[in-house]
């Protein structure tokens, strides 16, 4: 007589056999496709493999966070492009999240003027294609006056067709990156401690200002000042921080576009907070700010974080629009490398692997954050 356990065991064996066969067929198909591609490339006289990564590129590009040269090998040029992608992606994610939180809160406001202004913002920037926003903004920026007629703010910040020039700490690139990683670690530590949002942001902001000031005083160049102010010398600005036009257009357009979507995520999360909780806060005499920071936001985060993670991944993938305005991100570098080297399959594989690594890492972080924010009873 066949028992229930026997039936379950047979079902598990059948599933295992089917899964094994499916995996074997998939592996055979992939190996066959790779072999066929190698034969076709060999017939066309095109070499395959990653040996080309050690060859010099022989071409230059517009932007880099580190020193570069036309004699750099392909592997270093690709790493530079990867770093540029990470830089614009994470800066845009940070700014989009902050702005989206503000706009989303305004969308949840009972004040009709604030709500209407936030609604107009969302409808405008969410419904215009991102690449169109980036190209439009880039076109506006390159038609700004030259450095000698640059638009200035308090003689410290300048905007010209060369980009945005602003004061910066007089630190080397390595020190600045180390400081940035330290501040990122501080933000993660505050999340782990589950510090309330407004209080945590205040702690992080105050600590960031203090740490930057101390670092600038201790590690500034001998005889140098704490701040480096841009100054016009001849036909260009020296000193300070220069943000190229392409980077300004990229960060601004992605931030405006991404924050419109994040604002809707925030609004939806705030609307899901039971009205009884806010009424209880009002009955206890809490101010509207305290109700927002201590009741609505902590409760809303549990429903905000999962879709917010999807928006972060989307923003990282949106960095590929840089090729339309000449920003040298990884997609731009890979496209030029394909044209110069002809190693299409290898470079496309590296591009896909890089984005898979970054986006999978973001997804893991979001899953971890979501698990930390869940109520223990759930």
Image (cartoon, rainbow, N blue to C red):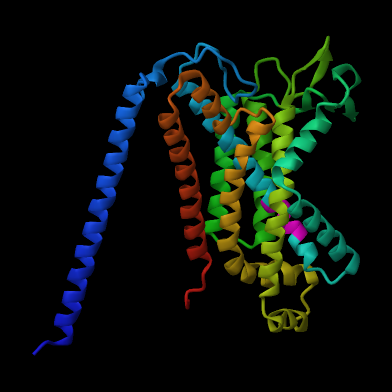
Query: In screen coordinates, is 134 left or right of 37?
Result: right
Viewer-proximal residue among 292 and 3: 3
Magenta stretch: includes residue 99:
yes
Please tell me whether residue 360 is drawn above or below residue 52 in the rendered image.
Answer: below
Viewer-proximal residue among 89 and 240: 89
Q: Quadrant of the N terminus?
A: bottom left
| Residue under the image location 66 percent in, 63 percent down | 265
Q: Which residues are magenta?
A: 97-103
User: Which image quadrant is residue 38 in?
Assistant: top left
**Residue 60 visible here:** yes
Magenta stretch: includes residue 378:
no
Horizontal and vertical percent for residue 269? 66, 69
User: Which image quadrant is residue 316 in?
Assistant: top right
User: Which image quadrant is residue 247 in?
Assistant: top right
Name the outermost residue toward the left.
Answer: 1
| Residue under the image location 63 percent in, 27 percent down | 218
Viewer-proximal residue among 105 and 282: 105
Please tell me whether residue 175 is drawn above or below residue 33 in the rendered image.
Answer: above
Query: In screen coordinates, is 230 left or right of 171?
Result: right
Number of marks in the image? 0
Predominant secondary structure in magenta? Answer: helix
| Residue under the image location 70 percent in, 15 percent down | 223
């Amino acid at each position: 007589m066949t028992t229930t356990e026997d039936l379950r065991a047979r079902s598990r064996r059948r599933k295992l056999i089917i899964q094994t066969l499916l995996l074997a067929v998939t592996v055979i198909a992939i190996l066959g496709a790779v072999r066929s591609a190698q034969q076709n490339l060999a017939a066309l006289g095109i070499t395959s493999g990653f040996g080309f990564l050690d060859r010099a590129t022989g071409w230059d590009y517009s932007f880099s966070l580190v020193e570069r040269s036309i004699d750099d090998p392909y592997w270093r040029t690709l790493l530079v492009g990867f770093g540029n992608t990470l830089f614009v992606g994470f800066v845009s994610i940070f700014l989009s999240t902050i702005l989206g939180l503000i706009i989303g809160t305004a969308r949840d406001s009972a004040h009709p003027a604030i709500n209407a202004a936030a609604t107009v913002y969302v409808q405008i920037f969410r419904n215009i294609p991102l690449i169109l926003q980036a190209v439009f903004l880039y076109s506006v920026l390159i038609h700004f006056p030259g450095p000698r007629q640059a638009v200035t703010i308090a003689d410290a910040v300048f905007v010209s067709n060369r980009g945005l020039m602003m004061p910066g700490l007089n630190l080397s690139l390595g020190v600045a990156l180390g400081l940035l990683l330290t501040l990122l670690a501080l933000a993660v530590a505050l999340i782990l401690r589950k510090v309330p949002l407004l209080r945590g942001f205040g702690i992080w902001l105050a600590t960031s200002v203090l740490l930057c000031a101390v670092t600038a005083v201790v590690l500034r160049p001998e005889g140098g000042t704490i701040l480096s102010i841009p100054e016009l010398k001849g036909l260009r600005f020296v000193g300070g921080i220069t943000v190229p036009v392409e980077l300004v257009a990229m960060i601004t357009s992605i931030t405006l576009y991404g924050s419109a979507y994040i604002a809707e995520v925030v609004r939806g999360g705030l609307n899901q907070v039971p009205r009884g909780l806010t009424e209880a806060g009002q009955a206890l005499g809490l101010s509207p700010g305290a109700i927002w920071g201590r009741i609505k936001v902590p409760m809303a985060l549990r429903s905000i974080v999962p879709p917010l993670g999807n928006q972060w991944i989307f923003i990282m993938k949106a960095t590929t629009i840089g090729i339309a305005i000449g920003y040298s991100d990884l997609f731009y570098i890979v496209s030029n490398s394909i044209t110069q080297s002809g190693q299409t399959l290898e470079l496309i594989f590296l591009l896909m692997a890089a984005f898979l690594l970054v986006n999978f890492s973001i997804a893991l972080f979001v899953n971890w954050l979501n698990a930390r924010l869940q109520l223990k009873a759930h």
